[in-house]
Structures are given as C-alpha cells and as structure tokens.
Amino acid sequence: MDWSACEIAEVIPGKVGGVPLIRGTRMPAEQVIESLDLGETVDEIAYNHDLNPADILRLQMYRNSHQPALQH
C-alpha cells in the first residue's frame, strides 16, 4: 500500500529500512495493519507497542479509505 499521503505515516531513509512508520515511532504501518487484520484490538496494539490508540485508528481509517474495492 502507498502510505505517502497518510499524515500519520512517515518514511525516514535509514530508519527501519526505509519502510513507512507511524510518525515519531519505529513501528511499521503495515505491521499495525497486519495485527488488526489478525484480530488484535487497537487497545492491545497500543499497549503492546506503546502507541497512541488514536494514531492506530487514523492509520486504519486511511487504509480503509485507500484500499481498492474487492471484486465479487
């Protein structure tokens, strides 16, 4: 997914291999989304990785609004 337009994600060359991170952290955006997809709650992710729950929700909203519609 292209995270370049997401205000909560940032890419810093040389930091965690240059993957998109939650701003101000070393937590990859994709890892948070994968955890959500696997059924982990926002509160669990926030607690386990010392993240702001609001940032996780913003990341999830961005993903949901930029995810291509599934074909049935």
Image (cartoon, helix red, strand yellow):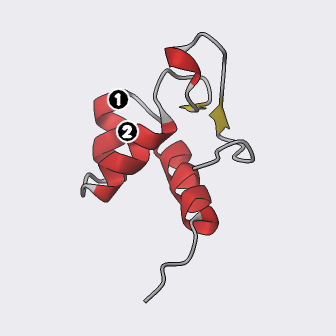
In the depicted structure, whether residue 65 falls above or below residue 39:
below
The picture quadrant where one finds residue 46 is top left
Look at 49% across and 21% down and name the residue there.
Answer: 26
Label 1 close to label 2 by CB (< 8 Å): yes
**Residue drawn at (53%, 23%), measured in percent from left and top?**
25
In the rendered structure, find residue 46 and report the number of the disc placed on it: 2
**Quadrant where the image shows the C terminus:** bottom left
Q: Is residue 68 left or right of residue 5?
A: left
Question: In the visual, does 28 lie left or right of 34?
Answer: right
Q: CA distance from mark 1 to mark 2?
A: 5 Å
Q: Nearer the viewer, residue 9 or 57?
A: 9
Query: Circle 2 — which element?
Result: helix
Q: How many marks?
A: 2
Residue type pointed to by label 2 = Ala
- Residue 43, image x, y percentages: 33, 47
- Relative to 55, does residue 12 appear above or below in the rendering? above
Neighbour class for label 2 at 10 Å: few (<14), some, many (≥20)?
some
Residue drawn at (25%, 55%) of the image: 38
Which element is circle 1 on?
helix
> What's the amino acid at mark 1?
His
Q: Which residue is label 1 attached to?
A: 49
- x, y percentage for residue 7? 72, 43
Residue at the image position 66 percent from the left and 18 percent from the top: 12
Residue at the far bottom: name it: 72
34 to 31, vertically: above or below = below
Left or right, 29 with respect to 41, comes to right
